[in-house]
Amino acid sequence: MQIPISRVVCDFIILVACGLPVLIFHLWVEPFKRGFFCDDESIRYPFHDSTVTHEVLAAVGLILPICFILMTESFRSFVWNEQHTGQSKLKTYHLRDLHVHPLVVRLYTFIGYFLVGVCFNQVLVDIAKYSIGRQRPHFMDVCRPSKGYTECTVDLFITDFECTGEDANRIRESMLSFYSGHSAFAFYVASFTALYLQGRLIRPLLSRLLLPTIQIALVAGASFVAYSRVSDYKHHWSDVLVGVVMGSAVGIFVAVVVAEVFKHRHSHMCEEVTRELGLI
């Protein structure tokens, strides 16, 4: 099968186009400067370092699903194909004159869908964060506004203020509470990966408990990330709740609608030969 070079180019253009708004937001867009009530206790918590840092979340959240995709597609390409079809030769692909192994095509496809979904999720997060500008629970401690920080008049809504804190990056981040990017990303990864495994593997693989155990572990890890954002005073509980819902929704959309992981799950051709190993 010939792979059109135009499709590959188009895929990369779309991926870059989806990621470009994220770069623009983080480099050039300032969050909306929202006013506050100086007696609002919900924004007077002390600053606390993140239990789960951006770097750790990004590393685990990107590497783990890619490893699952790599293992799953390798198993499907080699173990399932050779043991149950009796063939070692897989469908051949060509990119112009270059022979491309089917495993490479599958990895390119599913990892590509996953990464595009990451961009979709982050764009939605940034649109909300920068347009709403909700203060984080540690806003007062980081910003130290020129009005309302030390002296406060009850029920006075302050809009004309300047932050006197020393860390400009923390001040900027203190206005990006809604909604939780950590929670959205963690649940995007968990929902996409859980559905991908459900669609590409059937439960009786080695043990009936293996797949649901992995899926619950993914949700548990994402839940820990979400809970930590509240206990670290990084977000209000409502920010985290919306992040969980939005991240899960994007993960479900990408896995089911874009990647179509369940499309061939009930194929009659594969039903008999996959019963033992639990693969499609």
Image (cartoon, rainbow, N blue to C red):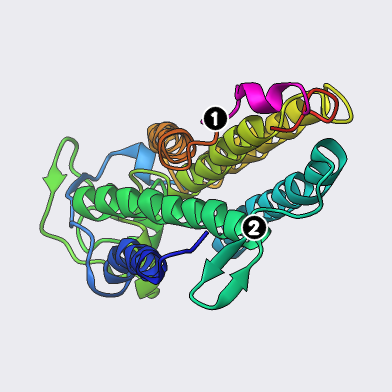
The quarter of the displayed image where residue 216 is located = top right
**Residue 263 lies in the magenta-colored region:** yes
Residue for point 65% across, 36% down: 200
Residue for point 19% across, 37% down: 154
Which residue corresponds to mark 1?
262
- Counting from the top left corner in percent of width and height, residue 275 is at 80, 23
Q: Which of marks 2 and 1 is nearer the N terminus?
A: 2
The residue lying toward the viewer, choosing from 29 and 187, is 187
- For residue 263, side relative to residue 88 (left or right): left
The quarter of the displayed image where residue 42 is located = top left
- Counting from the top left corner in percent of width and height, residue 119 is at 40, 56
Q: Residue 102 carries which label?
A: 2
**Residue 188 lies in the magenta-colored region:** no
- Counting from the top left corner in percent of width and height, residue 128 is at 26, 47
- For residue 237, side relative to residue 273 (left or right): left
- Counting from the top left corner in percent of width and height, residue 196 is at 60, 38
Q: Which mark is residue 159?
A: none
The residue lying toward the viewer, choosing from 235 and 89, is 89
